[in-house]
Image: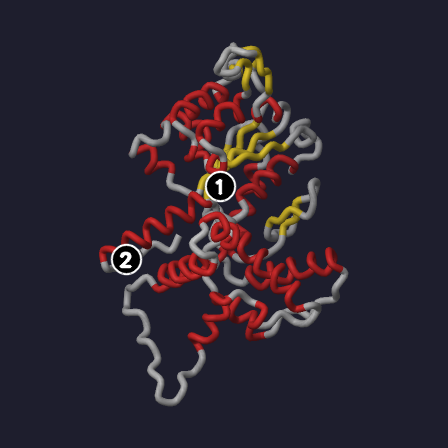
Amino acid sequence: MMTRVLWVEDDSEVRLVGASERWTRAMDELRRLAAHERAPLLITGEPGTGKELCARYLHASNPSSSRAGGPFVAVSAARLPAERLADELFGVETRADGRPAARPGLIELAEGGTLFLDEIGALPLDLQQRLVGVLDGEPLCRIGGEGSQVPDVRVIAATSCDLRARVIERSFHPDLHQRVGALGLALPPLRERDGDVRRLIEHFLERQRGATGLAGGGVSPGALAQLEAYPWPGNVRELRSVVERAFLLAHGAPLDLEHLPPEIGALSRASAPPRPGSVRPSPPARGSASLGEAVRRHILAVYAAQGGNVTRTASALGITRVSLRRHLRQYLAADARGKEPLSSG
């Protein structure tokens, strides 16, 4: 089968597009993991790298499997309030006041199929322990009820944080890490996938042509150069958003610098020859984190452009609010100390 970059075309089809060395290795490993239909699995990678899409592929990769015909239920632990997670995952039998309120949780709704649990590191420790029981084959117990049946569910978890470090910090249960981390897949960030930005742009443009009926004129050399030079902290999700927005602004003309967000177009102005009498900024010192600085400047620029609104900024970047807040805390703390952070992720 041809190796391409993952994207969901509709509810039933997962396409594979792209050919960088890093992505090819990841997709080869993905196909090997598809043979393990029941075992839990952990997918790691930065926000926007395609973790849920890989989970969808694993769910549907074997059409002859009964699990492929079952439900695929996805939930992000980072996007639900902690007080709602227990009810949403395990279901409710009775309310806090004792009144009946039978409602199945997402684990029950995924019966016979796959539960994709994104940002598993955001689960509170008590729910981590309950999930270990489910993975060990114990009867599922709704909140306020008793265990009734052993669920037939494959759990595919995902995270953008270092769970091993969380285990050492005692904020992640070691038993849960052992259960979901026995099989793993690591997805590379888009900035490390040589040539795949161009391939993805072509793919997203083709999708936009089909969705809108507009012919579309491709991408100008200048815009393509800037898109390929940009570090993409939001990865494929951010690239898709940028291409779709630029396509609509171009109205069928080739995508050009004027159609790109200011923070990406600014790279072109920064690389332009200096005007007479102007002073070009000094290049980064040897060993400095120039990529990390580019990511920092981009995130802070988008944050400022969105008026300091975390929800809108996270949406524009294609990352979760949890990830954005982590970046902002790091950058603001470093600024307060008078030095730059060295992390690009």
For the point 28% across and 68% down, the residue is 286
For the point 47% across and 45% down, the residue is 320
Q: Toward which corner of the image does residue 290 lie, by quadrant? A: bottom left
24 vs 228: above or below? above
- Indicate which label's residue lies in the foreground, 2 or 1: 2
Residue found farthest to the bottom = 276
For the point 71% across and 68% down, the residue is 252
Q: Nearer the viewer, residue 249 or 98?
A: 98
* Element marked by disc 2: helix
* 3D distance between C-alphas at marks 2 and 1: 35 Å
Q: Which mark is residue 168?
A: none
> Does the CB distance between marks 2 and 1 fall below 8 Å?
no
- Residue 222 location (% of width, % of height): 55, 75
Residue under label 2: 335
- Residue 243 location (% of width, % of height): 60, 61
Looking at the picture, which amino acid does disc 1 mark?
Leu
Q: Which mark is residue 185?
A: 1
* Element marked by disc 1: strand
Looking at the picture, which amino acid does disc 2 mark?
Asp
The answer to which of marks 2 and 1 sits earlier in the sequence is 1
